[in-house]
Each structure stands twice: as C-alpha cells, then as structure tokens.
Image (cartoon, helix red, strand yellow):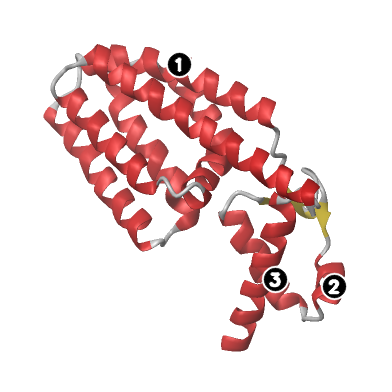
C-alpha cells in the first residue's frame, strides 16, 4: 500500500506540473490506461493521483466519460469573481442588520473548522465547502433566496479556483485573517467596512489565481 501511495504521489505531482504548465489544455481527457503506460505503473496509482487532482480543482470526472482537465480560463475566472463581488456585497449589506447571535455563532463555528482544515492541510476537497458555508451563514439573514441561489451557483463554478488559490499561492494565513476580520465587522454592524473587506477579499483571490496561471504559462513557454 505504501508503494502505491508513493507512486500515486509521483504521478499526481508530475500531472499537476504538466496541467499547470499548459501541456494539458483545459478539457483534455486523461485516459487512465494511457497514463499508466506513460508512467509505467498500474491503473491504481493513476486513479489515486487523479482523485488527488480532482480535490485540488485541476481535474473533474464526468459520468461515463472519465477524467478531464479543468478549464482554466483567465477570462472566465475574472467574470465569475466579478459577479461574486457584485452579488455577495449586495447580500452582505442586506444581511448585517439582521444578524443574530445565533447566526454569528454558526459562522464562527464553521470558520474554526475551516481554519483547522487549512492549517492541517486536511480535507482539501472540503475547503471550498467550508468557505461557502461560512459566507452563507453571514448572508442568510438577508432573506434574498433568489440572489443566494445565484451566489451558490457562482461558488460551485469557482470552487476549484478557490482551492487552487489556497493551495498554490501560499495565502492561507491571509485568507483566514480576512475571514475573521469579516466576521468581526459583521458582529459590529459595520456594513460599509465589511462590504469593502469582502470586495477586496474576492478580488485579491481572483488576482492570485490569475497571476498563478500566467506565471505557469510563462514557465511553460520558456521550457
């Protein structure tokens, strides 16, 4: 079992490098048989490696079709995160006045679990879920169900990018600090400052991801 794990990690590391370097374009099918032959391993470590990369947001599985590389479009990332800024600041502004102690306690409990997962490097596939659950706890009192449904869709589409940002830009501590700051401003009823911090939080996450992709693309061109 240890051997498989070592081989799976090797395959995951190399595939990650090749995907982020642009060798595998977005939407490319990753055939397990071909990869197993390429890396001279069985399909088991390849499958484990693909599941690791799925948790990191670089690979997605399509029913009955197998694994594909995620579309990593800068234009798409910017559009998704711009929409998040518009809708999430709008909802937060409406929510803050109605936040109860129970709402704040729920948000804080989620945040503590999120902190633990980030700090230990565990539950990578749940990072974006914790992220959205925390934000959702702050937004719920707005009582704007249609807007919250749109925000949920946007977060589902951007969750792979959120995981990438946390994993590869070394900004976990910054993200944690901003989340705690957001919670405290919401607790104090500081709507303007809270919305300003939320806007910056989302925009800087977007720029971190874009910079990462541009750097990787440049490195690939230089090889």
Residue in the picture at 36% in, 24% down: 198
Q: Using a 10 Å C-alpha cutoff, classify the residue at mark 1 as few (fewer than 14 neighbours), some (14 to 19) or many (20 or more).
A: some
- Quote the CA–CA distance across marks 1 and 3: 39 Å
Q: Position of residue 219 (x, y in %)?
A: 71, 49
Residue in the picture at 77% in, 81% down: 42
Q: Position of residue 115 (x, y in %)?
A: 30, 51
Residue with the mark numbered 1: 87
Do tag 1 and tag 3 residues touch (Cβ < 8 Å)? no
Q: Using a 10 Å C-alpha cutoff, classify the residue at mark 3 as few (fewer than 14 neighbours), some (14 to 19) or many (20 or more).
A: many
Which sits earlier in the primary sequence, circle 1 or circle 3?
3
Q: Using a 10 Å C-alpha cutoff, classify the residue at mark 2 as few (fewer than 14 neighbours), some (14 to 19) or many (20 or more).
A: few
Kindly tell me whether residue 165 is visible in this rendering.
yes
Q: Secondary structure at mark 3?
A: helix
> Given this view, does label 1 or label 3 mark the residue nearer the observer?
3
Residue in the picture at 30% in, 13% down: 93
Q: Position of residue 175 (x, y in %)?
A: 36, 40
Position of 154 with respect to 72 (left or right) is left
- Quote the CA–CA distance across marks 1 and 2: 45 Å
Which sits earlier in the primary sequence, circle 3 or circle 2?
3
Which sits earlier in the primary sequence, circle 1 or circle 2?
2
- Quote the CA–CA distance across marks 3 and 2: 10 Å
> Given this view, does label 1 or label 2 mark the residue nearer the observer?
2
- Please identify the residue farthest to the front as the structure is shown: 222
Q: Secondary structure at mark 2?
A: helix
Residue with the mark numbered 2: 38
83 lies above or below 173: above
Q: Secondary structure at mark 1?
A: helix
Residue with the mark numbered 3: 11
Position of 153 with respect to 70 (left or right) is left
């Amino acid at each position: 079992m240890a051997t498989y794990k070592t081989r799976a990690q090797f395959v995951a590391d190399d595939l990650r490098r090749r995907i982020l370097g642009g060798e595998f374009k977005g939407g490319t099918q990753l055939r397990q048989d071909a990869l197993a032959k390429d890396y001279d391993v069985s399909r088991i470590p390849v499958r484990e490696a693909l599941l690791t990369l799925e948790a990191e947001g670089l690979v997605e599985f399509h029913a009955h079709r197998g694994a594909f590389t995620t579309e990593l479009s800068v234009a798409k990332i910017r559009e998704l995160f711009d929409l998040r800024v518009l809708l999430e600041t709008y909802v937060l502004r409406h929510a803050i006045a109605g936040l109860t102690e129970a709402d704040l306690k729920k948000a804080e409990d989620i945040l503590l679990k999120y902190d633990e997962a980030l700090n230990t490097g565990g539950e990578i596939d749940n990072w974006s879920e914790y992220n959205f659950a925390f934000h959702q706890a702050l937004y719920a009192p707005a009582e704007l169900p249609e807007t919250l449904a749109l925000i949920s869709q946007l977060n589902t589409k951007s969750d792979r990018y959120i995981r990438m940002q946390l994993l590869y830009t070394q900004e976990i501590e910054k993200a944690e600090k901003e989340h705690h700051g957001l919670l405290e401003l919401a607790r104090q009823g500081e709507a303007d400052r809270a919305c300003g911090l939320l806007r910056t939080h989302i925009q800087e996450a977007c720029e971190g991801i874009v910079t990462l992709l541009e750097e990787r693309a440049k490195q690939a061109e230089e090889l």
